[in-house]
Image: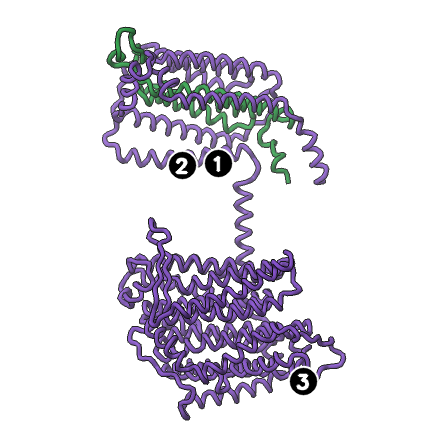
Chain colours: A purple, B green
Amino acid sequence: MPNPILKLWLAFCALLPLGIFLLIGASYKPPETLLYWPWIPSLDIPFSLRLDGLSVLFASLISGVGFLVQLYAIAYMKPYKGRAAFHLYLTLFMLAMLGLVLADNLLLLFVFWELTTLTSYLLIGFNHEKEGSRKNALQAMLVTGTGGLAMLAGLIMLGEMAGTYSISTIITQGASLAQQPWFTPSLLLILLGAFTKSAQLPFHFWLPGAMAAPTPVSAYLHSSTMVKAGVYLLARLLPVYGDSSLWFTLLCSAGTFTALWCAIQAYRQTDLKLMLAFSTNVILGQLVMLIGIGSSYAVTAALLLIAAHSFYKAGLFMVVGNIDKATGTREYHELAGLRAVLAISFTAALVTAASKAGLPPSFGFLSKEYLYKAGLEFGWVLSGTMLLANAIMVALALLILIKPFLKPHHPKAAPLKAVEHNQLLWLPPIVLALLSVIVPVALLNWYQGVIIDPAASVMLATPQVKTVKLWEGLNLPLLLSALTLLLGILLYVAYPRLKPRLDQHLSGLTSGPAVYQHLLNAVIKLANWQTRVLQHGHLTQYSLQFFLVLLAFLGTVLGKAFWQIHPLPSIEWDLYYYDVVLAVFLVIAAFVVVKARTLLLAVAALGTIGFLTTMVFLVYSAPDVAKTQLLVETLLVVFIAIVLRHLSAVSSVPRHSTSRRIIHACVAAGIGISITLALWIITAVPMNQEISEFYAQTSVSGGKGRNIVNVILVDFRAFDTLGEAVVVVIAGLAAVAVLAGKRINKLVSETDKEHR
Amino acid sequence: MEFLWCLVVGLMTACGVFLMLERHIVRFLFGMILVSNAINLAIFVAGRLTRGNPPLIASDALLPAAGYANPLPQALILTAIVIGFGLLLFTLLLAYRAIKELGTADMDKMQHAEAE
């Protein structure tokens, strides 16, 4: 792409999300705005969008963070090939994501859901020359795609239960659907979709794998957007399923286990990006748990945490991207002294890490307070596990900050590159860092009025909206926050001794990717097996398969027909002697063709059949057919006779084994009997003569002919006859081509040699 | 009398199908000819059989004599016979060519397209 066009394209990609962000802001009137376009009216699927507190929160994060990520990517992707395509994928992904959170129709939502899966596949696998990238992209797509299909089934059940696919209508029906028989199956299937998308245990493994993507993708998809799609869906459907105890149990257990397990995993990583990836799993677990609790404190906490996490995690990813740029590595042990070259990034890292650790007055602190408040309502287990997970978050924040930035640079280590002359590398993380502080300090009332209140009112049946305050005096949550910090610092100090021990204990466990790989291999094995069985390259077995299927088909259809016909039609013989003679000779001739051990005898028998058939047509008032049959049969026998001496003798080809031929005889007999029965049923029921009568009546008046069959062929159905003539001409031409064509034998043997 | 022909058609089809399962390509072709004949007869029988009253209109009449044979299946079979002939001719020459090129009439050995 020439330079000016590329620049224009990049500017467009960056400004599009900004425009959408402003548009959403302008068209959103709390509590909600509905937009409606007909899309597939015949299936009653409208393109309907809905702006309310929840979708506006997500949509503005997607477009706002999207804008910053596009800016960052312009700088970050500069040395990459195909950066125009990269921005295209990113833009497409953003649009799909926006559609997902704004859709007000279940099926529309599903379409966008799958579009995010597809576009994220392109993004994760962007470095497609690397095998690991392709593999991880495929893994992410298969895991989330499979979940998406399960979710589609669940959504259809939900739509059928509610009698509508409009999400806003379904939500107003609320918990009244709980009595329906499909309630639990739909709940489980939708959870499968949400859990795979939002990387909950045991599907969490694709998210760290997706770190094969370039860092801007991680900053976008794996902090603020795609992984939260599952959370969004759960939040959206909270009014429908929230009262179910199954919902509470599943979400809370999946959420807490994911948070705890992935926190421990994050603590074990040495790659900074993987640390962040696993800690994203932790936050997703916490969000799922909060929605599972579904109290007003929990909903408030979730609405705070979604935004807080998006800001600091995207910022931190960008900082890690800059570290990668400056040093060429993200390994914890190799990083030191970065403050010298990454001064501004360090500032951004400091603030975002503080938010991650939950230090006041950051956004992270605020959301953590409410997380504890929500957890405390349900006893110590939930808040205790959250405390442990959050303490590990603190330790991670310290790990990312202290050694890489503050420890002096090792003289033997790789030299550091100055990268901050490019403003676009440090501006976006700084903006995100600022937002992490400004929103809780100065914009809290605005956030409450625009996001929390309207969102809570659609998520909760009886909204008791909590007014969020940064400082609520000394209370238990604050104490827990202090405890978290203390424990986090301890974990940081213990890191050098604790990590090897954890590695020792945990490395033997079966990992998610291994299970996934086993399943994938099993599917491929199954595919190979069925290809071997069905596509074996033996022509006669193909014929056998074909006739077996035909027999099964005829058998079922006839079996059903026989049940319906009662009593069976009586048989009227009404025969003359020549009927019987013709029939007996035809059957004998057919058997002779089968039994003939020379081709000449078989051809003679075939000719006999042709001429006997001619007689049949003649006897039963079809002179034109008889004439044609006679001519065609004569020609065919002549042709076969000409070729006959070039064809191999019957004895030159071995016959099938006796058992195989018995099977063949059974299949052939079955098909023959089916045909007889079908024809018998057809001739036993009264016939509709309408069309034949029409032809007979209009033959003279309309076709000016007295041979009705002729009139049908050349007048009423003249186009058919023309087509028939064309077919015969084409067959003749093709036959000439077959005869005169270049010998392929030579070609075949040559390619054979090449293969050997 | 239709039932007699139902039996004949069934037997001819069975013989044809049995031949189409054989390994010799020319016998496969013979099976096809047999089946194609049988199916033409089947269409004919399905339209009912009439003795000695072809669907022709006398020169002084506007309608055929009462009880005339059903003309529609006859027209269809005429088309089927001709197209079937074209197809069979093509298949015959294809088989001839295959035997020449591959040096065998054994269908289970005609595997060049799927050679590994």
Chain letter of disc 3 in the image: A
- Residue pictured at 56% horizontal, 43% vertical: A532
Counting residues from the start of the chain, the first of labels 1 and 2 encountered is: 1
In depth, the one of A685 and A630 nearer the eye is A630
| Residue A11 location (% of width, % of height) | 56, 64
Residue A497 visible (yes or no): no
| In the rendered image, residues at marks 1 and 2 fall on the same chain | yes
Give me the disc on residue A153: none
Chain letter of disc 1 in the image: A
Element under disc 1: helix
| Residue B77 location (% of width, % of height) | 39, 20
Chain letter of disc 2 in the image: A
| Residue A686 location (% of width, % of height) | 25, 25
Looking at the rendering, which quadrant does residue A553 occupy? Answer: top left
Q: CA distance from mark 1 to mark 2?
A: 11 Å
Q: CA distance from mark 1 to mark 3?
A: 73 Å
**Kind of residue at disc 3:** Lys
Q: Which residue is mark 1?
A: A545
**Kind of residue at disc 1:** Gln
